[in-house]
Amino acid sequence: MRKILSILCVMFLAACSTNEQKVVPGIVPNTAQPPKIVTVRPNNVIGAVERIYFPPMKSPFLARVDTGATTSSIDAENIKRFERDGKKWVSFTLVNRETGEKMDFEKPRTRRIKIIRVGEEEHRVSVDMDVRMGNETFVAEFTLNERHDFEFQGLIGRNILSGRAVVDVSISNTLK
């Protein structure tokens, strides 16, 4: 039995040594330039700041993406509340700071919202606006506020983000 076992071991070792592959060194190419890294992001990933459009206006507004804000907001001037056919309406003007494009709007008031910011409370009116982000156009609620003291004219809140986009704060201006 030992003899058979020894023969089998020798045959096994012989079989293993005949299948041995030799590694031949090749020429390594000169890689002075580091390889280009391509990052692929899903279509629904947006950055910390994006451009939004309010048709029929042609120029975009820069908007901060704020996952902590419930409702989106836009910089509006000449905000005037009035009644039309027994319903509450509001007129206002949007002026794009970058291009100077200006447009007057009249919209039914959606509701009056209480905004609480660092120890103070204010009330704003909201309206439904046509808005375009990237290739998608939809209707979303925006509060109207004079945002002259803010860097960005718009604020994109959860009412737009939910089910529509994921935010990557390390990027900006991903939408056209």
Image (cartoon, rainbow, N blue to C red):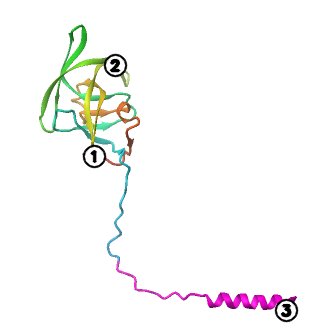
Mark with earlier residue (3, 1)? 3
- Which residue is label 3 attached to? 3
Which image quarter is the N terminus in? Answer: bottom right
Q: For mark 3, does the 10 Å Cα neighbourhood hold few (<14), some (14 to 19), or many (20 or more) residues? A: few
Q: Residue 21 lies in magenta, yes or no? A: yes
C-alpha gap between disc 3 and disc 1: 78 Å
> Magenta span covers which residues?
1-30
Nearer the observer, 5 or 66: 5
Q: How many discs appear?
A: 3
Q: Amino acid at mark 1?
A: Asn
Q: For mark 1, does the 10 Å Cα neighbourhood hold few (<14), some (14 to 19), or many (20 or more) residues? A: some
- Which residue is label 1 attached to? 173
Vertical placement of 158 versus 30: above or below? above
Residue situated furthest right in the rendering: 1
Q: Give the quarter of the image for residue 46.
A: top left
Describe the element under mark 2 as helix, strand or loop.
strand
C-alpha gap between disc 2 and disc 1: 29 Å
Q: Nearer the viewer, mark 3 or mark 2?
A: 3
Q: Residue at x 21, y 9 (%)?
A: 85
Mark with earlier residue (2, 1)? 2
Q: Residue 36 lies in magenta, yes or no? A: no
C-alpha gap between disc 3 and disc 2: 94 Å
Nearer the observer, 128 or 170: 128
Mark with earlier residue (3, 2)? 3
- On residue 113, the disc is 2
Describe the element under mark 3 as helix, strand or loop.
helix
Vertical placement of 69 versus 80: above or below? below
Q: Residue at x 31, y 29 (%)?
A: 140
- Tell me where residue 58 appears, x and y as whole percent: 15, 37
